[in-house]
Image: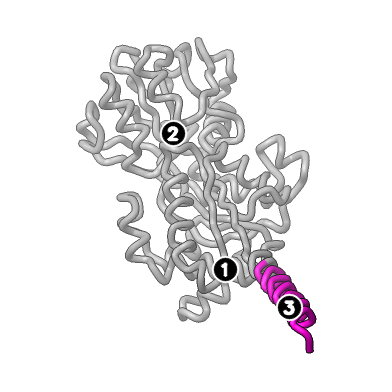
Amino acid sequence: MSLKMKNTLATTLLSSAVGLAATMGATTASAQTYVTIGTGGQTGVYYVVGQSICRLVNRGTKTHDIKCTAPSTGGSVANINAIREGQQDMGMAQSDWQYYATKGEKHDSFKAKGPFNDLRALFSVHPEPFTVIARADSGVEKFEDLAGKRVNLNNPGSGTRGTMELIMSEMGWDKGTFKLAAELKAAEQAQALCDNKLDVMLYSVGHPSGAIKEATTSCDSKLIPVEGPAIQKLIDSNDFYSKAVIPGGMYRGTDSDTATFGNAATMVTSAKVDNDTVYQVVKAVFDNFDRFKRLHPAFNNLNPQDMIKNGLSAPLHEGAVRYYKEKGWM
């Protein structure tokens, strides 16, 4: 064989090897699964939950080829609708909105689309008391005092907004009840309160909350009890609501316990998300449960056996069931 032929052959073999390597690399890259978890405002616990889960999932990417991201979103209703449309794989949602999505009730978007039959639950997380914070100079002492005040109802699509609309319906209120019915996002309302653009901010959130700490340390403000006949009717009519207490001394300006009500934060997905992906996400959380609990004080009292049943209205996803059965929890 001539030198020229040897060089030509060597070049051909090298090109083939490079091409094969490129093909294998493309195949490996395309095999990686990307999971998006919808959360909420960046100052809320939903955002912490999503970021924490993704951190645990991404620690094992080399093993399971799953890469997780958890962007800030509009909250419960927005997450459920995004999952339904295939724009997100998973998301955080209040337990009440998980229930209403399965029924196609309460929210206009749920009514328009009908029952979300493919909605699936993964687990519940922390309790979420409905929390009302008022400026100390607002004259607000009880929930009924919100009438005539400047109140942030929160952005449409958030769980807080949805719960407030249910309360308003029970009380015979509408937006005209308030001097101002603002629609700021959760992350924006503490500054607006302390800039005296609002009298009251609302938040369904796990405690302690960074947003509420911001509001109560940046200006004189306090937590307001949420109780009365309308609230009791909501509790009596819905299994996913229960009375709640925010401990006194947790926030500046509120030394006594604050009575309210609330539900649970839950992690949901769609039946269309494949079983192996869901299994690996659930496994990442519960195989590293002590690490997960340390990521936020609201997680301190979590118990896995309670998390796989409390506050869940949608059926458990088969990928989650597989893991729970392996652990002997089902």
Earlier-in-chain disc, 1 versus 3: 3
Q: Residue furthest toward the bottom?
A: 1
**Mark 3 or mark 2, whichever is nearer to me:** 3
Q: Which residue is mark 2?
A: 203
Earlier-in-chain disc, 2 versus 1: 1
Relative horizontal placement of residue 319, taking residue 15 as reference (left or right): left
What range is drawn magenta here? Answer: 1-25
Q: Which residue: 47% across, 11% down? A: 148
Task: Please say if 17 is above or below 125.
Answer: below
Q: Which residue: 43% across, 68% down? A: 286
Task: Please say if 118 is above or below 193.
Answer: below
**Kind of residue at badge 3:** Asn
The mark found on residue 7 in the picture is 3
**Kind of residue at badge 2:** Tyr
Q: Pick whichever, 231 or 70, lies toward us.
A: 70
Task: Please say if 317 is above or below 236.
Answer: below
Q: Bin the neighbour count of mark 3 within 10 Å (Cα to Cα): few under 14, some 14-19, many 20 and up.
A: few
